[in-house]
Image: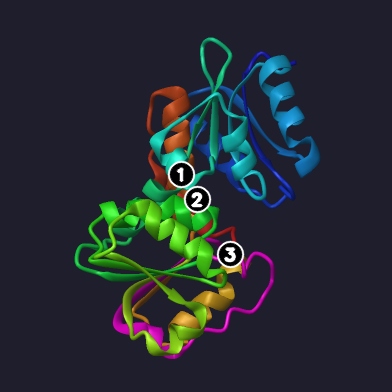
Amino acid sequence: MSQLLQFAVFGHPIAHSQSPRIHQAFAQQLGIALDYRAIDAAPDVFAQTVRHFFQHEQGRGANVTLPHKAAAFALADERTQAATRAGTANVLTRLADGRLSAHNTDGDALVRDLTERHDLDLRGHDALLLGAGGAARAVAWSLCEAGVQTLTIVNRSPEAADALADAIGQPARVHTRYWEDLASIGSFDLIVNATSAGTLGQALSLPMSLAGSRAACYDLAYGKSAFAFLAWARAAGARYAYDGLGMLVEQAADAFELWHGRRPDTEPVYQSLLLQVA
């Protein structure tokens, strides 16, 4: 086993992951020697594979992506507030006593990408969140904390949307609507696609009326998975249409800082990925 600090990203599939490239770029930028690799773990062996990595391969930290974020949360010995709110974790860290700590950096990463990289002030925005699964739960609180005026959550299964709204507990500000009502609920300043439709190659039929004249549309996925939603956003006349590549880089930077105590400069890494990710 290499004497380098050991880090990894777990997913299934995982060959497409940009995380090794991102973390190696951060490490090079800050002069830190580490080994970061992608580990493909099917759901039935995920927990076993993670434990082996941390207990027998001197793993220090791991990122977690689909479909394992809920399993990572369940596996941990302690959990941050952000992870507990989401019920999922995208970061696992081995503590000094060997226990695992779970964190979720997705919400903060989304807001930072929107407000700092894309220079959007979310205060006063009427926001629409499509989806109510783990990805949506990870970002809903952060959108509220960033100052959106209202947050409307729409999911094909209304029970999940209602549960998320109830958990946030701001009924005057956070509402749910039925998916079949999308054509009649008006327009929004911010539309966040947190569904897995693009990732799964499924069509996401949305009415053009959702996008207000100054709307920003954002897909948590990136690259080809975001193409269909971003094409809809542009056709609907949205002012801005962004994929989740910047969010990916920002959540990686949060994990990197958590593990190494130093925050990398994300912009050059983001610009480099823009040229490579299609």
Give the magenta part as a residue range: 194-222
Residue identifier under label 3? 223
Amino acid carrying label 1: it is: Gln
Residue 10, given in percent of the width and then of the height, sits at 67, 39
Q: Residue at x 62, y 70 (%)?
A: 197
| Mark 3 residue type | Gly
Give the Cα distance between marks 2 and 1: 5 Å
**In the rendered view of the protein, which quadrant contains the C terminus?**
bottom right
Secondary structure category for the residue under label 3:
helix
Where on the picture, by quarter, is residue 116?
Answer: bottom left
Residue at which label 2 appears: 248
In terms of secondary structure, where does tag 2 sit?
A: helix
Q: Residue at x 75, y 15 (%)?
A: 1
Q: Mark 3 or 2 closer to N-term?
A: 3
User: Quadrant of the rendered structure where residue 258 is?
Assistant: top left
Q: Does any portion of residue 237 appear in the rendered image?
A: no
- Give me the disc on residue 251: 1
